Image (cartoon, rainbow, N blue to C red):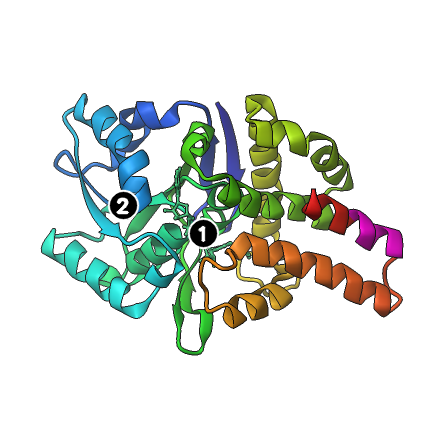
Amino acid sequence: MQKIRVGVENQPYDIWVGNGLLDKASDWLAPYARDGRILAITDSHVARHIAPRLSDSLKASGITVSFFELPAGEQSKCWSKLAEIIDWLLDNHVERSDHIVALGGGVVGDITGFAAHIVKRGCGFIQVPTTLLAQVDSSVGGKTAINSAAGKNMVGAFHQPSLVVIDPDTLATLPRRELGAGFAEVVKYGLIDDPVFFDWCETNAEAFFAGDAEARNHAIIASVESKARIVAADERELNGTRALLNLGHTFGHALEAETGYSDKLLHGEAVAAGMAMAFRYSVRRGECPAEDAERVGRLFHS
Ligand code: NAD
Ligand code: GLY
């Protein structure tokens, strides 16, 4: 198991990465179970594929977990689902000292974190990301949000999780298309933070997609280490460092808006297209060699 510290000022926290961590959930979740109970948010796909593993592993230690289940998909990151989550937490007597578990992808993580930020004037939360995108990006750094009529992530808060637990084995059930969308965010760290890691992505993409455990773990750990470093340097995106994480996102968000935040274009796919566009735009402005833009385009097409 690998432990990575996110050194933010007020509430530093750990990210644990390890195969099989979900099946040992009582080891890391027991300290957060008040009266032997955990409240968790998930979505309909994760409820089928992953949630039973969490419940079973906790049951052995006498801990019960109650789930609120969102319909899977970006459309759930909205006001009405936020209100339903808040009502459910209050019906279940949530306390400020509680830690709500977000079990799922970026949609579940973003809305759970925001709900935790506002319910009872703020309680804790734990990220247990189950998509590649959430494991390498959205579960780390404390950006939480829902979408509104004005656009994506327009309503939200910075609210850091108390713990992030990443079990790469959860990717076994993730559809190939979702894996590809998450890989865009992996490549992003090579582009903004670590040229050697970009070379690694080019060389190892095939092994990664074939399911090679070592390649997957390396991609996740290197990405999380990058993100932890960047977030610690600029937690609230005030000095420009964290803005690097938004590479390609201006183009990407425009593409997502045009496709109605639907599964016509996944967030990670929009980011991949957006990064390729950003490189081409930089070539046109004379700020980037054409061969760099070609290299980025080639990796995303492969
Ligand atoms: P998602 O949460 O919609 O998950 C993608 C799909 O995979 C869903 O259908 C989900 O049900 C399914 N799924 C999840 N885990 C699975 C598993 N192990 N097996 C089978 N199916 C599984 O999408 P995402 O790509 O994880 O996240 C995208 C969201 O994250 C967007 O809303 C984006 O704005 C947000 N985001 C936030 C940050 C941040 O810093 N907070 C960063 C990047 C992206
Ligand atoms: N995904 C962008 C950020 O965390 O800042």
Find the residue positioned furthest to the bottom: 150
Instruction: Tell me if 218 is positioned left or right of 139 in this view.
Output: right
Q: Position of residue 12 (x, y in %)?
A: 46, 44
Q: Is residue 245 among what the camera can see? A: no
Q: Position of residue 13 (x, y in %)?
A: 44, 41
How many labels, in total?
A: 2
Ligand 2 in which quarter: bottom right
Q: Is mark 1 within 8 Å of ligand 2?
A: no
Q: Position of residue 91 (x, y in %)?
A: 10, 56
Residue 227 against residue 218 in the figure, above or below: below
Residue under numbered circle 2 = 99
At label 1, the amino acid type is Asn
Residue 99 against residue 115 in the figure, above or below: above
> Which residue is located at x 66 percent, y 63 percent?
240
Image quadrant for the C terminus? top right
Residue under numbered circle 1 = 10
Q: Are marks 2 and 1 in contact (CB under 8 Å)?
A: no
